[in-house]
Amino acid sequence: MGDKRDRYAWGVGILSVLGLSCALLIMLGEAFGGPDHLWYWQLGSAALGTIFVIYGLILLLLRKMGMIGPRRAER
Amino acid sequence: MYRRTLTALQRFTLRLDVAINRVYPSDLNPLYYTGGLTNLFLFILVLSGIFIFLYYVPSLADAHPSVTYLTDRVPYGGLIRGIHRYAADAFIVAALLHLFRNWFTDRYLFSRDSPWISGMFMLLLGGLIGATGYILVWDERALATLSTFTELLRAIPAIGGAMASLLVGGGGLSEGTLPRVLLLHVGPASALYLLLWWHYIRIRHPKVWPPATWVLVSLGVVTLLAALVPAVSGTPAAPGATPGAIPLDVFFLLPFWLAGVVPPVLVVLLVAGLFTAGFVIPYVMREAPREMGVRHAGIAQIIDGNCTGCELCYYDCPYDAIVMVPTPHPGLTRAAANRKLLAAVIDSRCVECGICIGACPFEALELPGLLESDVRQRVAEAVRA
C-alpha cells in the first residue's frame, strides 16, 4: 500500500510540474498570439486543454490516495 | 431471442462496470455518469453557443464570413468554435452510451418510462440541433446538408413538402432561410432543458453532474481536440453552382449520408421506425426474467377502513405519490374512527417500491401484486428451506 501511495504521490508531483509548464505555455500564447499569429493561440489553447486533463488526473490520484472523496467507511 | 440478446448485453455491461471499477474507485466509474456527462457537454455547448451567437450573422451573404471572422480574428474564437464542434460530438456519444446502458440494464421499464421517453425526445432534438448546426456554417457542406435535409423532409408523406418549405422559407433559398435554421438550432436547445426537467422528475437521486475529475478531463479533452484539430469551414456555399461530391459526417449525419445511398423515403421510414420502437419499448417489453430483479407489484392501494390520516406515508414517499385529502367518512378501526384526512395515491407517480407499506403502522396500504401475507409466507418458506 505504501509503495502504491508513493507512486501516486510521484504522479501528483510530475503532473503538477507538467501543469505548471502548461500555465507558462498559456502565458506564452497570450503574450505572442494574435490574428496574425494564430499558432501561438493554438499553443495556448492546447496547453489550456492539457491543464484541465492534468488537474482531473491529479484529482483522480488524490482520490486513489484517499486524500479526497468519501470517508473510508462510506466507500 | 430479443430477451436472450438483452440478457447477454446486460451481462457484458455489468462485466465492463466491474473491469472499470478495478481501475477507478467505484464512485468515479465514468460509465455511471453517462447521463451527467451528457448534461455537462450540453452545458459546454450552451456556453460556447452563446459566444458564437454574438458573432454569427444569419444571412446568405454574411454567414460564412462571420464564421471565418470568429475563427481567425476573434481572440480564441477558433478555440470556442472547436469546443462547440467537439462537445456536440461528445454529447451524442455520451447520450448514446447512456441510452444503450439503460436499455441493456432494463432501466426503461415501469417507473423509468418517463425518463426513457423524454430521453428519446431529447435524442431526436439532439439530431435536429446537430444537423442545423452544420447548415449554419454556410459552406459547401452546409449547402449539401440543407439540400439532403429538404429531400428527406419531402419524402415524408402528406406534410413533408410543407415542412421543407417551412425550413427554407418558401420554395427555394432566401434571406429567410438561415434565420429559420438558426431558430431550429437554438430553439430545440432551449427545449432540451425543459425536457431535462421531465427527464429528472421521476428519478430519486439523479446523477446530474459527473465528479470533478471527469468534468475537468472531459473539458480538457474537448479543448485539446479543438486546439489540435481546429474546426474549419469549407468553401463558401454557392447556391447556383453544381456541387461536387461532398463527404458528409457519417457519425453525426448518418441519416443524411444514408440518403445518398438508398432512397430518402427508406431513410425516413428507418428513422421513424427506430424512434417509434424507442417510444413503445417500455410498454411492450414489460416482461423481464425474474433473475433481473424486476417485479411488478402493482400501484399501492389504500385500505380505506384502516387509514387514520396520520400522514406518515405522505412524508415517507420519496416520489410524492401520496397526497392527503379530507376524509369523506370515518374509518372502520378504532384508531381511524376520528380521522380528519385520508391518504390517496397518485397512480402515475407510484413506483411500487413499497416504502409506504413500511411507513404505515396501521396496515392501511398494500401492493396488490405483493401482499404482506404473501411476503411473510415466502420468508417462512425460505427460512424452512
Image: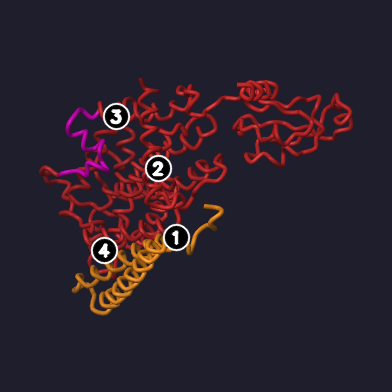
Residue that carries the numbered disc 4 in the rendered image: B78
Residue that carries the numbered disc 1 in the rendered image: A63
Nearest to the observer: residue B256 or residue B291? B291
Residue that carries the numbered disc 3 in the rendered image: B268
* Residue B88 visible in the current orientation: yes
Earlier sequence position, callout 4 versus callout 2: 2
Find the magenta span and give its range: B247-264
Q: Is residue B325 left or right of residue B380?
A: right
Q: Amino acid at mark 4?
A: Gly
Nearest to the observer: residue B201 or residue B169? B201
Nearest to the eye among marks 3 and 2: give it: 2
Disc 4 + disc 1, Cβ < 8 Å: no
Dot 1 falls on a residue whose secondary structure is: helix
Q: CA distance from mark 4 to mark 3?
A: 35 Å
Q: Establish if B224 lies above or below B349.
A: below
Q: Which chain is orange?
A: A
> Looking at the picture, do discs 2 and 1 lie on one chain?
no
Q: Amino acid at mark 3?
A: Val
Q: Quadrant of residue B165?
A: top left
Q: Quadrant of residue A34?
A: bottom left
Disc 2 + disc 1, Cβ < 8 Å: no
- Chain B shade: red
Residue that carries the numbered disc 2 in the rendered image: B18
Q: Amino acid at mark 1?
A: Arg
Q: Position of residue A11 (x, y in %)?
A: 34, 66
Disc 4 + disc 2, Cβ < 8 Å: no
Q: CA distance from mark 3 to mark 2?
A: 39 Å
Q: CA distance from mark 4 to mark 2?
A: 40 Å
Dot 4 falls on a residue whose secondary structure is: helix
Q: Is residue A38 left or right of residue B284?
A: left
> Looking at the picture, do discs 3 and 2 lie on one chain?
yes
Q: Position of residue B376 (x, y in %)?
A: 68, 24
